Image (cartoon, coloured by chain):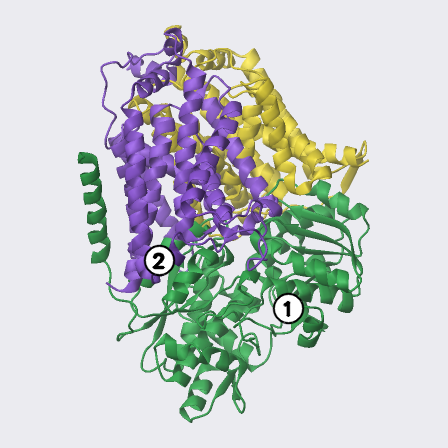
Chain colours: A purple, B green, C yellow
Amino acid sequence: MTTAWQFYFITLLTYSGVNIIAAWALNLQYGLGGILNFAFIIFQAVGAYAAAVLTLGPAGGITTFQTYVGGAHLPWLLALVVATLAGGVLALLVGLVALRPKRTDYQGMVLLTVAIIAAVVVTDEKGWLNGASGLVGVPKPFNESLGLGLIEYGWFYVGVVAVAVVLVFIVIHLLTSSPWCRQVRAMREDPVAAEALGLNVPARRLQVFVIGGAIAAFSGALLVGYIGSWSPGAWGPGETFLLFVCIVVGGLGNNFGAAVGSVLVLTVLFNGLAYLPIFSYTTAAEALQLVLLGLIVIAFLWFKPRGLFPERRRRFAFPSAGPDRGTAVAVEEAR
Amino acid sequence: MRTRRLLAGAVALLAVVIAGCGSSSSEIGSGALVMASYQPYTGPDAAYGPEGTALCSFAAYEINSGGGVMGHKFQCEAFDSTGDPADALPVANRMLANTTNLIMVYGPTQSAQRAVEPVLNQEKIVHFPDSGDPAYDHQTSPYFIRNGPSDSLAGTAIAAYTANHAGYKHVAIAFTNEEAAQTVVPALKETFAKLGGTFTSEQTLAPGQTSYRTEISHILASHPEAIVTEMDPQTAATFFSEELELNGGELLPTITTSAALDSNWVGGVAKAIGPEQFMQKIVAVASNTPTEGPGYEEYLQALKKAPNNIPERENYAADPYAQLGYDGLVCGALAMLEANSLESEKWAPYVPKVINGEKGAIVVHTFPEGKKAIEAGKTVRWSGAAGLVTLNKYNNSSTPFTGYKWNGKGNGVASLEPTGGEVSSKELEEAGGA
Amino acid sequence: MELNLALGFGLVTASILALGAVGFTLQFGITNIFNLSFGQVMTVGMFAAYLINVQGGQSLWVGVLGGALAGAVVSGFLNKTVFMPFLRRGVSLDGIIIVSLAVGLVLENVMLAFAGPSFKAYNQPRTHSIHVLGMILTVQQLLIIGISVAALVGLHLLLRQTRLGKAMRATAANAGLARTSGIATDRVTMIAWCLSGALCGAAGVTFALNLATFDTTTGSSLLLVVIAAAVFGGVGQPYGAMLGALVIGLATEFAALVSPNLKEVIAFAILVVMLLVRPDGLIPSAATKETMGAR
């Protein structure tokens, strides 16, 4: 295999691992907790930024062309931990505001607004995180002590990501099979009934949100360790929706489904479509690839509305009809 | 357990599927050599893509009309670098892995550059970035050739032009908060202050807003002699049309960067404010890009004759990005001839030599002319679509700058003419650039 | 003086936002569908007006009508062929968000494939500025404000004074109950989608007109601000959306006096503060639903 091919695989595998972790975090928040976190990508971003500034060292020096706050030379593992915590803290702050509305869809729109604010502020305040140019030259984790070539290092990093995926899987698995998660599911199915049974719904919701935010930040820190640069272009509010596509395609509430969905959509479909032999002198070829992606997603939801791997129905599940299920059921009943 | 095993299976399957489509890339085999246009074809910067494909096709036509290099013809392929560094990286990897006979690349643009530059250099692919990111002002890779100006140099030049040639000492600056615009600002501010200028108003604009009227009335109230600016096409169209409206149908004298010479900028803004004010008031300070002379004429020929259905190709007749990109790719081909090799390790060092010209080199304007000279054992210096270009030891352009305005000859406002103010290399050096 | 100027500019922005935000909230209120393809439907309106105005040589105001019509047709078409069938099939409302996202992707890129990435501009006569109460506005801008006010007053009358409006409000409040009371909710929903599509198309054209140029991504970039205005007012509340548009529109222009680069942030920060005080928006929905509906 040529080095170019190896680079390609290394990138795809690293991205897949990062996407799987991110999909699990979103699945926890939305698939299990029912929180429409349309600001998901900012939690991944905060992890990436935190890991970047904490390993770049103080601003100035060799990298005079970029300005940022909080520069330090932490060991990578410590930076990774701090980045993860940063995601949790940001989620706590955002959650205290954005989860206040009673309706979940409404929360989603507030979160979308938060994502836009974050993108605009970070782009604009050049002094904080170097604005639109973003940060560059983020040291590769363990690179100096290992002294490997670019390719060998790449495979090493794939290994690091694989370990991270396993670790996150264990955490997620423990969480989702715990009694705590039963309460979370109950809250998603019917918050009113859950509350009536004595569950503190807002507190549960905030917990799910914070844990998901921390895991998202962890994935961001892993990603920036590989790319070596991070800027607002990489975390536009639209990126969140792609992850939603992943978990809906995979099957909401199902961790295995989320993993498969993210690989299928972000790795296979996104890269695979580019192999179609179309060439044009305009943007038509690339546009048609995206049209195709849209159509595949629509067709998929039509034929597999509950995703590839639907969540298993559990014995304790509440009856599916809530107090007011909106038009969907009204229409359904009318048939 | 089941979960992880299945997952591993899926990944392995994916690897097999992708490997199946591939072939070796690093060694050049028989058949046409591929020049890649690695540019955004989707997203907000999607207009760069067709420009890249077009200039690449012109260069391919030019090279092929001289019989190509060592029996190989040249052709172009397009790769969508999106506009997002994270999405750009896998596309670059795919381009490098899966393109048979990939010989050189036009790109990356600024948004993708920081993510993909290390991979391009590692794979020893000669590339001609069309970004002005000052982070690469002192780069040392031989595979990086920036024959257009860095933004830090552009900032210095625009300040020197404004103070010394246009004679304005009190100006307002309005730049969008985007990466490509903001990298111009530090050098501009520093040099302009050094030259005794002051800013009456400084506005950083968020692009794509419904209106900039409040910002404009702020600028107008500060009574500047001129506005110094760089904005993306859409923001510029909104801004200038609102300025017209608030300033009694007239623009203030406006000095902008080479971003304004991009065909999309000219098209968008001219449509929005009409050609008269555009031609009267807007000046773009850009590295010298003559629109006459034998090298430029040859470019026009390639532009007209390049086969295939390239849409709106006349837009690229006076577009320094297209001209410099074409020049870069043709110089690459000439460097292969001089090195008598298709191995980038061997021919890459000849690219700066072809651009700068070694002692005793003959100036050539067309590829066939250059090929003939090289075959006769001479060394050449390229003077093509953008005239003579000079590279410094970091493979960055140190070409002098000129103020350009549009004269409306030909179609619309497309044709450029110099205002007579040239910011020389010496002046740039004194002002702290280069 | 500067305050008056900013007020005038803010009113123009608010008028455009109001068209979009009311359209968005109307769809949402009646069908509970969080339609992320709304931005691309705005772009469809822009291109329809472009065809009429530039290719067809008609007046720009015919173009605005055409844009609104195109928005209505596309919106109604999507409702009929995509969203309703998906609802009937029992796909969750959240799943439909993803469907709408995919629809937006398809719409935007079909336009990109056909129209290309270059910027388009309308043919509009250059008119004089009019000075009113310290505000400077062009004739076009006064017309934009006029169109917006007329459309919204029309909508108000429709919702409050007609049987159809009553049926719409009933459907929004409780579709199941409305159906059992003999309201043809399918038809009402269809009409609501067409209406909101018309507002959406009109918002698109006036936005493009105010921007001077547009391309295939312009509508989706406006959508986020439209959503913010809708959230401010309380989603599903047309009057709240109007207020939200007014607040966000004015706030952005006043904020530009202080810090032009952060004008959007300041406007959105007001939104956040407001949400801390009133978590469900200025005008909370009458029936505060706890969940989004069937999953």
Query: Residue drawn 28% across and 72% down?
Result: B27
Give the amino acid type for the residue marked by disc 2 in the picture.
Leu
Picture coordinates of residue A158, whole percent (x, y): 30, 50
Residue C261 appears left or right of B30: right
Q: Is residue A334 left or right of residue B408?
A: left
Q: Is residue A273 above or below residue C292?
A: below
| Residue tagged 2 | A146
Q: Whole-percent x and y of residue A126?
A: 61, 47
Chain letter for the residue marked with disc 1 in the picture: B
Which image quadrant is residue B337 in? bottom left
Q: Quadrant where the C terminus of chain A lies?
A: top left
Q: Nearer the viewer, residue B379 or C247?
A: B379
Element under disc 1: strand
Rounded to the nearest angstrom, the CA distance separating label 1 from label 2 is: 55 Å
For residue A78, say whether it is visible: yes
Q: Is residue C295 above or below residue B272?
A: above
Q: Nearer the viewer, residue A127 or A8?
A: A127
Q: On the rendered structure, is C131 left or right of B137?
A: right
Q: Amino acid at mark 1?
A: Leu
Which of C264 and B71 lies nearest the eye of the viewer? C264
Residue occupying the far bottom of the picture: B376
Marking on residue B416: 1
